[in-house]
Image (cartoon, helix red, strand yellow):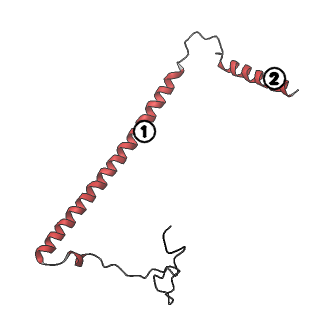
Amino acid sequence: FGWALLLLCSALYLLVKFLKRRPRGGSEEPAPEPGEGVVEALEAARRRMQEELDSRAAQYREKMRQQEEQKRRQKIESWENMQTGRSCRETRKPKTDKPSLDPLGGQGGGSCSWRPGRRGPSSGG
């Protein structure tokens, strides 16, 4: 009984699909080609994607230009500092020395300095 039901559903599906494809009405004017709308939609999508790509490229070029300008300024500043006798390290911001908190590795600010021993035999194998 299951195979008959499956065959009936398949035939009904194909019948509905065939009826939807058939043109209705008796108008004599030619129907528009189905490909025309698709081509226009593809062209519009291509244009949108190209505009997006162009805008990203412009942003990237501006970012690269700003980075080059910043590098140029830093070189000029370091040259001026060298001419006046100052170190280039004086102009940079000092780093804060924070101890790393790693209790198992023996690094950092803990009060215990115990480290775990090596695993395995001491000789290579």
4 up-or-down from 61: above or below:
above
Q: How far across and down, in percent of the image, does residue 85 sit?
A: 13, 78
Mark 1 is surrounded, within 10 Å at the Cα level, by few (under 14), some (14 to 19) or many (20 or more) other residues, namely few
Q: Which mark is residue 67?
A: none
Q: Which residue extends farthest left?
A: 83
Amino acid type of the residue that numbered disc 2 sits on in the rendered structure? Leu
Mark 2 is surrounded, within 10 Å at the Cα level, by few (under 14), some (14 to 19) or many (20 or more) other residues, namely few
Q: What residue did someone put label 1 on? A: 48
Q: How far across and down, in percent of the image, does residue 87 sit?
A: 19, 77
Amino acid type of the residue that numbered disc 1 sits on in the rendered structure? Arg
- CA gap, disc 1 to disc 2? 46 Å
The residue depicted at 77 percent of the width and 21 percent of the height is 11
Q: How far across and down, in percent of the image, does residue 74 sit?
A: 21, 67
Determine the secondary structure under disc 1.
Answer: helix
Front-most of residues 50 and 26: 50
Q: What residue did someone put label 2 on? A: 8
**Marks 1 and 2, the one that precedes in the sequence:** 2
